[in-house]
Image (cartoon, helix red, strand yellow):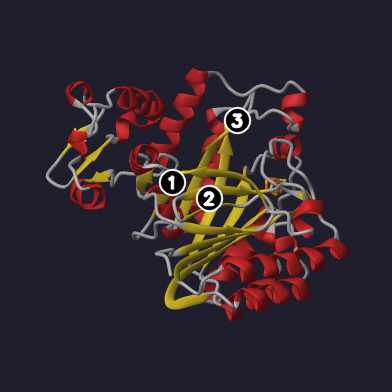
């Protein structure tokens, strides 16, 4: 049995398609869902080796778009996965499809974390995004989650749309703060090809305003622990599942378009539902050699405030990090900081992390 501690499950169905969305999603189709869940069960049976999982993440698409019966069917499939008493079990949900009955079924299965797509509170922006949101219902649902014991709640916020102002962004953040959730994930708009926004030639804000918005978010969320470039947590309620990715750990990915990392292979499944239903799953595999493994390790680790833990790195690769990279220049510029335990990018330079990673990759030595 390999050392896999996490599993991602993809539920691709959405009742509405957001204008900016580049994820793997398909229109909600009740008949297809039943076949999809059967195929998902088959994929799990064909691959899962019985490892005890520390985290399970049910993402989408919109998992909360499933009917109550389909949700129960999904959970009956997932009972095959071995979870611990304290495993982190997350489901993604949207406020236009979540109900109290569905939340009750989540609790019954063992979901202990919900990640809600809120994105904005501005009606004109929601219209551009093609999303619906009733702010009173948001408050009601978040307090219901807490009442039934799901206190680990994430809210997603998007920003950076053309003509969006800092005042509007402030209203969004103020609203989210009133919800008093444990985790907030923020996303600056990226106009991906093939999305409606891209085709409609919409624009995002200027680079300067995008930077100002990012800084503004960081200052407004000062009571949260800014532990990753775009993620904020309270009471150490970090996303354990995402930390698995950022620590470059192994994980299963099951479902349409899902990606996984097992046995030194990073893979992605097909985005074609007809292929997936015929069990023609993988469309991409990358064998990770030692060089690529170290590059992934570094790039992913440096996204978080924890950075590269020097001892762990040495244990994994037999040599110190300094055998692989010459980071003196980056240290002298302050882009990287070394302390007793780790090497990390200080928060004030996270906004430049892409540039810093490129410089770091160029500083590679022979090992
Ligand atoms: S709900 Fe999520 S997955 Fe579905 S279209 Fe919107 S952004 Fe994409």
Q: Residue, x 71% and y 23% (percent of image)?
A: 202
Residue 231, numbered circle? 1
Q: Residue at x 44, y 71 (%)?
A: 87
| Outermost left residue | 340
Mark 3 = which residue?
Answer: 190
Please determine whether, in this image, residue 14 is positioned above or below residue 87: above
First along the sequence among labels 1 and 3: 3
Q: Secondary structure at mark 3?
A: loop
Q: Nearer the viewer, mark 2 or mark 3?
A: 3
Residue 27 horizontal side relative to residue 361, left or right: right
> 303 above or below 327?
below
Q: CA distance from mark 2 to mark 3?
A: 22 Å
- Mark 2 or mark 1: name the one nearer the start of the chain: 2
* Callouts 1 and 3 close, C-beta under 8 Å: no
Q: Residues within 10 Å of mark 2 (few under 14, many from 20)?
A: many
Question: Label 1 near label 2: C-beta < 8 Å?
Answer: no
* Crowd band around label 3 with a 10 angstrom C-alpha radius: few (<14), some (14–19), many (20+): some
The image shows residue 249 at horizontal and vertical percentages of 40, 54
Which numbered disc, 2 or 1, marks the residue closer to the eye? 1
Identity of the residue drawn at 21% across and 53% down: 315
- Give the residue pinned by disc 2: 176
Is 282 displayed left or right of 113 in the figure? right
Q: Is mark 3 within 8 Å of ligand 1?
A: no
Give the residue displayed 43% in from the left and 70% down from the top: 1
């Amino acid at each position: 049995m390999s050392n896999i501690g996490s599993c991602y499950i993809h539920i691709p169905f959405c009742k509405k398609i957001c204008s900016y969305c580049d994820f793997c999603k398909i229109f909600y189709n009740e008949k297809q869902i039943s076949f999809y869940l059967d195929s998902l069960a088959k994929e799990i049976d064909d691959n899962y080796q019985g490892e005890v999982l520390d985290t399970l993440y049910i993402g989408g698409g919109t998992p909360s778009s499933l009917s109550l019966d389909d949700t129960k069917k999904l959970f009956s499939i997932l009972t095959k996965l071995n979870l611990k008493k304290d495993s982190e079990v997350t489901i993604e949900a949207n406020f236009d499809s979540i109900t109290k009955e569905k939340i009750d079924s989540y609790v019954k299965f063992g979901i202990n974390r919900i990640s809600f797509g809120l994105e904005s509170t501005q009606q004109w922006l929601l219209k551009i995004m093609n999303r619906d949101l009733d702010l009173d219902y948001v408050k009601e649902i978040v307090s219901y989650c807490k009442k039934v014991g799901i206190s680990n709640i994430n809210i997603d916020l998007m920003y950076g749309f053309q003509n969006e102002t800092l005042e509007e962004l402030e209203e969004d953040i103020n609203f989210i703060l009133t919800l008093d959730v444990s985790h907030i994930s923020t996303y600056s708009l990226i106009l991906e090809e093939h999305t409606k926004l891209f085709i409609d030639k919409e624009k995002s804000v200027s680079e300067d305003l995008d930077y100002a918005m990012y800084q503004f978010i960081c200052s407004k969320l000062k009571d949260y622990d800014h532990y990753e470039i775009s993620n904020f947590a309270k009471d150490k309620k970090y996303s354990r599942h995402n930390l698995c990715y950022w620590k470059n750990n192994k994980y299963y990915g099951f479902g349409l378009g899902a990606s996984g990392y097992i046995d030194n292979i990073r893979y992605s499944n097909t985005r074609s539902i007809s292929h997936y239903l015929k069990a023609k799953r993988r469309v991409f595999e990358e064998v990770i050699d030692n060089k690529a493994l170290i590059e992934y390790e570094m790039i992913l680790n440096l996204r978080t405030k924890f950075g590269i833990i020097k001892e762990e790195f040495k244990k994994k690769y037999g040599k110190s990090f300094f055998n692989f990279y010459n980071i003196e220049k980056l240290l002298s510029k302050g882009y990287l900081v070394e302390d007793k335990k780790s090497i990390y990018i200080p928060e004030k330079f996270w906004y430049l992390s892409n540039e810093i990673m490129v410089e770091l990759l160029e500083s590679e030595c022979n090992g």
